[in-house]
Amino acid sequence: MSGRFAGKSVLVTGAASGIGKATVHLFADEGADVIAVDLNIAAETESACAGSIVNFRGDAGDEREVAAIVATAVERHGGLDIICANAGISGGMAGLFEQSADDWQTLLRVNLIGPFLAIKYGARAMIDAGRTGAIVCTASVAGLRAGAGGLAYSASKAGVINLAQGAAQQLTGSGIRVNAVCPGLVDTGMTQGLYTAARSKGREDLIGQLNPLKRGGEPVEIARAIAFLASDEASYINGQALVVDGGLSTSLPFAKPRRLGQASF
Ligand SMILES: NC(=O)c1ccc[n+]([C@@H]2O[C@H](COP(=O)([O-])OP(=O)(O)OC[C@H]3O[C@@H](n4cnc5c(N)ncnc54)[C@H](O)[C@@H]3O)[C@@H](O)[C@H]2O)c1
């Protein structure tokens, strides 16, 4: 077996779509044995590539289910080396006065408690097996500043960034690294409404209008950053939030005069 992740056991949540799906395939193509978990999986399926993929239905926000999934991964692959806590929901863009505590609880359960559970049970399994490992949580640029998502979503992602820092500290001496990735706008199930609306008007150019690269991201561009953080190439990167947004978050939002401060070419 060859490949950057040959022989590695990898768990990915939110694996049936978008960033998670691209991550599953990237790891498996590079030799990993991947346990792919999503709410939206009807039945257990298995496929082989350079590595292997087993798809499980599971709820990333449910403590008992996460514990069971981690146990299954350990049982099937003899341990766990890499965890990608990626499952997330957007919760919509309802305003401050339109949101209820229930809305927040529903969102925080998946977006913030989910990564906490993945770290809690995943790191425990690594430690019990005497293994080191890497955990990568999918946060968002919405966790860096307000305005890129709904209130609860943004707060949940700010929480994920802090969770990665705190967990890295808590796991001092274990050899387990915990990092977060902060995608900008990416073409996935979560952003389908926005992309479809722009495409249906023939205005896909609007999607990249605030971004120096003038486009949204592709799921694989985030998967590559997740794989980097999980790999030995990132062996000294711990407790960090890697922004992968084409430069979107480098500027405060302001209306740019046509040519001001911009190179012409
Ligand atoms: N798409 C973007 O622009 C963008 C930007 C920044 C961050 N993110 C984050 O990326 C991550 C992946 O989202 P995506 O954009 O690929 O969206 P997506 O909707 O395409 O994929 C998310 C997947 O998570 C699954 N899921 C939802 N709740 C779950 C649960 N409780 N348990 C298990 N699986 C569950 C869904 O079924 C879906 O397959 C999320 O954490 C999201 O917040 C996305």
Image (cartoon, rainbow, N blue to C red):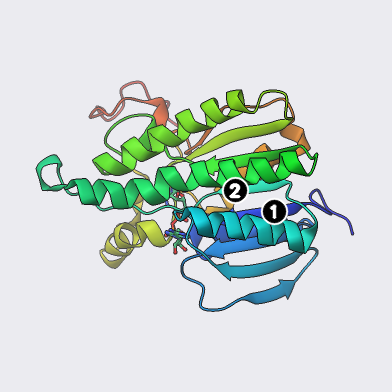
Q: CA separation, marks 1 and 2?
A: 8 Å
Q: Which mark is residue 47?
A: none
Closer to the chain start, of discs 1 and 2, is 1
Residue at 53% of width from left, 26% of height from top?
165
The crowding category of the residue bearing disc 2, from other C-alpha atoms within 10 Å (few below 14, some 14 to 19, many at least 20), is many
> Is residue 41 shown above or below 109?
below
Nearer to us in this view, 61 or 34:
61
- Which residue is outermost to the top? 261
Q: Which mark is residue 10?
A: 1
Residue at 47% of width from left, 61% of height from top?
59
Q: Position of residue 123 (x, y in %)?
A: 65, 40
Q: Is residue 155 left or right of residue 64?
A: left
Q: Is residue 33 left or right of residue 246?
A: right
Question: Disc 2 marks which residue?
Answer: 84
The answer to whether any part of residue 200 appears in the image is yes
Q: Is residue 257 left or right of residue 251?
A: left
Residue at 47% of width from left, 48% of height from top?
114
> Is residue 25 shown above or below 104?
below
Does dot 2 land on a helix, a strand or a loop?
strand
Residue 126: which quarter of the image?
top right
Q: Position of residue 206 (x, y in %)?
A: 31, 49
Amino acid type shown at disc 1: Val
> Is residue 37 shown above or below 129?
below
The answer to whether any part of residue 224 appears in the image is no
Residue at 44% of width from left, 53% of height from top?
61
Amino acid type shown at disc 2: Cys
